[in-house]
Amino acid sequence: MDSGRPKPAKLRLWGRRILTAAFLLLVAWLLVTHARRTDWDAVWTALAGYDLAQIMIACVLAAGSYMAYASYDLFGRYYVGHGITASRTMSIAFICCAFTLNLGALIGSIGFRYKLYSQRGVRKGDVAHIVGMSITTNWLGYGLLAGLVFLSGSFRFPTGWIASDALTNLLGVALVAVVVAYWLLCIFAKKRSWDIRGQVITLPSIRIALLQITASAAHWLFMGGVIFVFLYGQVGYFSLLGVLLLSSIAGIIAHVPGALGVLEAVFLALLADTVAPAQLLAALIAYRAVFYLLPLLVAVVAYVLNEVSVKRTKSSR
């Protein structure tokens, strides 16, 4: 046996690292290229041009998106049957969502959920189920929306790109098929539970499955609405939504917290021929302020208040 031969796991690890590094280099190149061509005075002028009504509408849409996301944990509450109130459950989910978007899923979605739920007596195994239910819910809605957008013809890659309409349609079919398969499992599967490495995974009812997809779709639709408002409708909504959905995947591939730089690179690459780069960058800066930074400030306050409440409860016992 050749003990010096690289193991498959190591090869896969190095392969992922090389692909991620190459992807980040591409993102950096796109950002630098567009930054050099951008009239930054025009960007600040565009930012200053947003009126209060626009900002308020964007804030309402952002709030709707976070409310939809916060409802994900209600499915987890139903799934594991913990005794935390629905309002407190949604508060925990909101905090986790804001930290996830800005700092990454490992910290927000997983780390904060374990801490906040464990403080209130939820077992680690149950927290794992809640995290799993939240992730499943999020990507079910994503898959359905992305599939429908790609199949509708609303989204097209720029001329000259390798990706063709046939490939886009194939991807759309695959995404919708996954969601439909999940629905069919929830309706017809005779075996409802599986033990995977000590964790019991149970299929929800079709009613819960439909509610999951509705909540997740609302989250992504509201999110797209925030950018749409700041772009003055210069891009069709569903075309814009397709770009946003692609940028989310790009952010996951790059492992960059908040998809910082990645989101901007994808939007510039796909929409620079449709929207003036200065206006596009202004819209993305405003989007980050409303959808990322403002909710993060609210989440920090909510988290501090939660910690004070937990300490008071412990000291009163």
Image: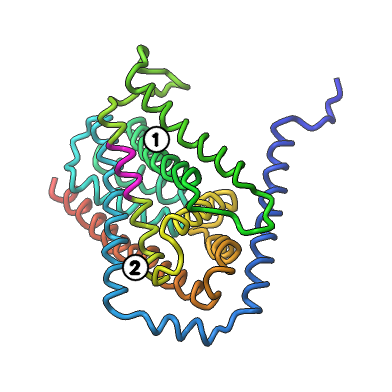
Q: Quadrant of residue 170?
A: top right
Residue placed at 30% from the left, 46% from the top? 116
The residue drawn where x is 14% and y is 45% is 317
Q: Which residue is mark 1?
A: 132
Report the label total. 2
Snapshot quadrant of residue 12 = top right
Q: Main secondary structure of the magenta part?
A: helix
Question: What amino acid does circle 2 point to?
Answer: Leu
Where does residue 279 sit, x and y in percent of width and height?
A: 49, 76
Query: Label 2, on which residue?
Result: 294
Q: CA distance from mark 1 to mark 2?
A: 27 Å
The crowding category of the residue bearing disc 2, from other C-alpha atoms within 10 Å (few below 14, some 14 to 19, many at least 20), is some
Say which of 234 and 312 sits in front.
234
Q: Which mark is residue 228?
A: none
Q: Which residues are drawn in magenta?
A: 211-218
Q: Is residue 160 above or below residue 139?
A: below
